[in-house]
Amino acid sequence: MTTIDNIDGFFSSILRASGQFTHQTVYHATKIKLIQNPTGNMHCPKCGDTRKMIISSLYLSTNNEALDQMGLYLLNKGITDSFDEIFPKKVFAALTPSLWNYTCNQCDSVFNSVIYHGPTGISLVVLSSTYGGFSTPNTPESVYYYLDQANKAHLIGANSAAMAMYRAALEHILFNQNFTQKMLGPKIKALNDAIMARTAPKWANELNPKILELINKIGNGAIHPNDGDVKLQSKLDTELLKNVTILFKVLLFVIYEADNKMDSMIKALVDVSDVF
Ligand SMILES: [Zn+2]
């Protein structure tokens, strides 16, 4: 699913909202209020899941000349020309820098995003009024904190830093589950031992502990010297971070939410069954 916490997802959501991918549409989009009520998907920490966000512009670049030039260029090209040839980044370059508002369609949480010229080109960062990144209603604050750090780092392209913070989040998850050994490796080993001894928490039986070892290893790789080979850090790409994010979403649900969800479902069913 495309999400608006990165520049490509933001562009495609704005474009989708413009209806037709024509030069004129984009020209008007850049010149006026962008598009009426564009929306995009993003994780809402308060709702604990992906939600539709209403996008609105707060500040557009004062570089009107650039906007004019871009608009004239687009109009002169005519709407029958291939849209993909000139799009997307040229058009939106005229919108850099700009400031945006995202409002969660369900809980009204507000986020601001900034489009700016970053070292690798046009970039976007999301600033949250609550802890950013992802979490769930019952995730402990200490875990939440490191997931927020990971998310902030990832949003500005600092993937090695993000991976190190995901490793820290995992360590706090285990610490909060009473695995208080000094480092993450021994914590995971203690969890494995508890699974073997059938004394582990229920959630531990529902996941393969190997996955925790892999997070530990990759997290260590993000901060260790690796024989001086910094090129290895390129392995910590967006695809990897996406998979790690999905993994943590699963972990948070299984550890902190599954039982609560089941209890509330049972309660709802019992209330109805009592009628009969
Ligand atoms: Zn929400």
Image: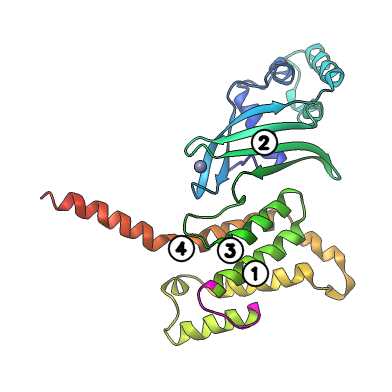
Residue name at image x 66 percent, y 73 percent? 216
Label 1 sits on residue:
215
For the residue with label 4, is its CB less than 8 Å from the closest atom of ligand 1? no
Q: Nearer the viewer, residue 155 or 90?
A: 155
Give SS at disc 3: helix
Residue annotated with mark 2: 10
Q: Which residues are magenta?
A: 176-184
Q: Magenta region, mostly helix, strand or loop?
A: loop
Tell me if 128 is positioned left or right of 267 in this view.
right
Q: Is residue 236 visible?
A: no
Say which residue appears at 74% left-offset and 21% top-offset.
30
In this rendering, is residue 23 above or below 175?
Answer: above
- Residue type for callout 1: Ile
* Residue identified by numbered label 4: 256
x%, y% of residue 211? 58, 71
> What residue would you read off at disc 3?
143
- The foreground one among 206 and 48 is 48
- The residues tagged by marks 4 and 3 sit, at their Cα atoms, a distance apart of 11 Å
